[in-house]
Amino acid sequence: MLGLVALPYEVLSIIAESLNIDDFFNLGISCKVLHFLILDDSLAKKVILKKIPHSPEAIRARNGSKSYAKALRRAAKRRNGISTAYPYTVSTVGFCDAYLYCKGTLCYALDESVRILDLHNSSDHEIVVSIPGLISEALPNVMQQGSGDFQVMYYADRIVSCLWETSLTAWLVAFNLESGDILVAEELDSIERLFVRHNGEYLYYGNHSEIDRDGHKKWSIYGYDFCARKWFPEKVYLSEMAGYDIGSTVCFEFYENYFYALSNQTSFEVEEIDWTSFYHCYRFPLDSPAKSLLEMTNEEDMWRRQHQEGPIDDRWMSLQLDVDECSGELKIVESRKEWYVGSSQSQRNYYTTDIIFPKADEEGSLYGTYQVGSECKQTDFIESPILDNASASFPTSYSGSSTQSQSVSQTEATASSSTATTPYTPHPLFDNNRLPNSQLLRLRKKENNPHYLDAPLRCAHKTHYGDDGSVYPTFTIVKTRIRTYFRSCNTFMDVVDDPLASDWKSTQRLRLRAGSRRLGSPLLDKTGLLRACSSDIQTAQDELYVNQGIRYWPDLHDSNYDPELEEVYTLLNPPSHLGEVAGTADDRSFVYVTGPRDKPRALIFVGFDAGIRLKGLRRWSKLEKKSPGVGEGPHVDGTPTACAVGASLDPRENDRNVAFERKGKEREGVVECIHVDIAPTTQCPPSQPHLVDMEAMICTDGATFSNRLTRDDRNSWIWQEKPMYQDIHMGLNFGKAPYLGSA
């Protein structure tokens, strides 16, 4: 350490820039002399733009704050908090009957209103939307139908889209939180497997209802232009896309002005005889949805797995699209629980796959492939190793024959000598002469359509072998309430129900359970030169990575009772709201609900971002007095302080019956919808105007929101209130020591 301290600043900065973001931060907190590394804005800018230029912290620093040192500390703390399963914030943020957590913003419905809270930006206010008022404003002719089911579908760029369903019709409604404008009010033909995606310019929704000639239901996508205020004339019909379970077998996302649809299913039929599985990805430009512009990946470029690798437990499977913080490329991230290669124990594995689309030349012919998010360039065949920037010194591991290895070498030599305009011949697929010599061939019939491709190379850096159940205790899927994978820091995390062994009632006790790995030292041979890793991928995992083991939080206190630790467990498991648990995670936090379904459930927020500081939370300290908990504040029964439910200025409000109807799968971050009985002209204005600060709400055109809706306007359907979590006063901030620097 003395050698580093004695180095000139210029030399030390060059050394520091070569480190990854985590090592750079750890070096800066190793001693007071080197603390300047994480405080120097110019040095932090070089590191963050070189290592994680596409992270949310880097984007925020470029666009607004300009403080790269603060962005670096915030990113490093986030990654460290996730990998060590140590959150910075845990708080009860509200009570709800249904919720959606999307883009760091929580939208939760309680009684006849929807409350919207920006958690990632530590908002000190909530926007409240009256459901009857919204429906009256957006659908005045539908109010005569009375009751209906309301569900928030999506949130992005200060726009909320929701579904209003009555016994006769279903309507998609989208509105702007800043201007209060109704952007979309469209009657839907079908809401089967309905999903919505939008940004500030375009909205797309899709359903799984159209039946093709083969008798299978297919996905149909419809688009709307917010600027032009009109629907696109042509819908996109994904006739070849199999799968229907969003988040498990299919997913849909926006990325760089394109709409992406992804499936991990190959066939609509139950496959009795098959050998190879592929990903299928489709995309089209957001401003021109048309069949002629629809792009599809080739199966030979999107290999998923060989069925010989073992059976899969579909209940644990998850599928998502994720943006790489280093390269900015869009990646496929899939979690599978497999009996890998015939093992007697099931194992949860996590796979990252590049999205590769065929590239067309000026004449329209396909001659190469390029990766989504990168510049268009010709790449090697899928059999060639595709390495991350951090792993360029290491070869790819795989399980294959020597013939494969020889063909790969020939492929690499051919690709390296070719130019960017040289066409290539696609890999031969589904040649019956190439089918494996197995007993299944004797069962194959003429009507079977088997898919087979020689297993390509697996990259050790894109394969994370997780928990195999050998570490006690083990948890079933019923006890594993939330499952997620943080690709940025190679960590899988679960929220598990782990009752005390001494508790014969098995009372709910939620804990965080995480497994992480970090890149180890370079592999050297006896002469000190870099060497290749093993050809066996599992051995290569042990050589290239250091397994951090399974971590739990909070700590266990079965034998020795700890009142401070019990306070944390009470925070995660509110005694008055124990029961069914469901949650949603993003890249730095997750939100879950707990409690019985016949009454409002508690909303718990767990954040790993040190920059999220909810106002009024008590810092974790044994010396401070406990804040009032649930039962001591105005939200004891889940009733908002400024909502007109039960205390309306309109006498008709007291006669309104509100019933809650639970239905639908827990997908897309939406736990359930609520059933609301409304009168045709009923509104829900704030019952306590002194709590509403309308001047603080600014529209996009620079005008104040109060110019549109004043405090005394009894017909307003949207207003601003003090957030519910500030009245609940049940939360803790687990900030680290001050010498780590302010985030």
Image (cartoon, grey):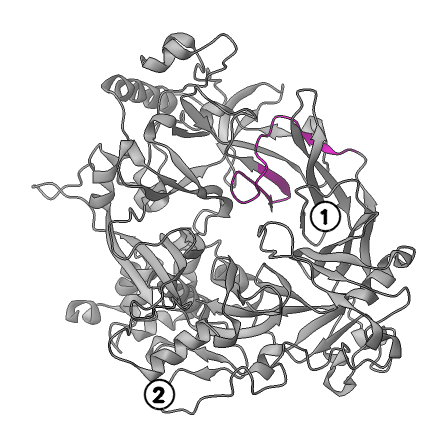
User: Relative to 702, is 76 on the left or the right?
Assistant: left
| Residue at the farthest left position | 526
Question: How packed is label 2: few (under 14 Cα within 10 Å), some, or many (20 or more)?
Answer: few
Q: Identify the image quadrant of residue 562.
A: bottom left
Residue drawn 54% across the image and 45% down it:
247
Q: Amino acid at mark 1?
A: Tyr
In the rendered image, which residue does mark 1 sit on? Answer: 202
296 vs 364, nearest the viewer: 296
- At which x and y percent is residue 11? 26, 62
Observer able to see residue 432: yes
Observer able to see residue 714: no
**Quadrant of the image containing the N terminus:** bottom left
Q: Secondary structure at mark 2?
A: loop
Q: Secondary structure at mark 1?
A: strand
Residue drawn 39% across the image and 36% down it:
312
Point out the stretch of residues depicted in magenta: 234-261
In the rendered image, which residue does mark 2 sit on? Answer: 622
Q: Is residue 162 above or below residue 540?
A: below
Tag on residue 742?
A: none
| Front label number (1 vs 2) | 2
Q: Amino acid at mark 2?
A: Lys
> Count of labels shown?
2
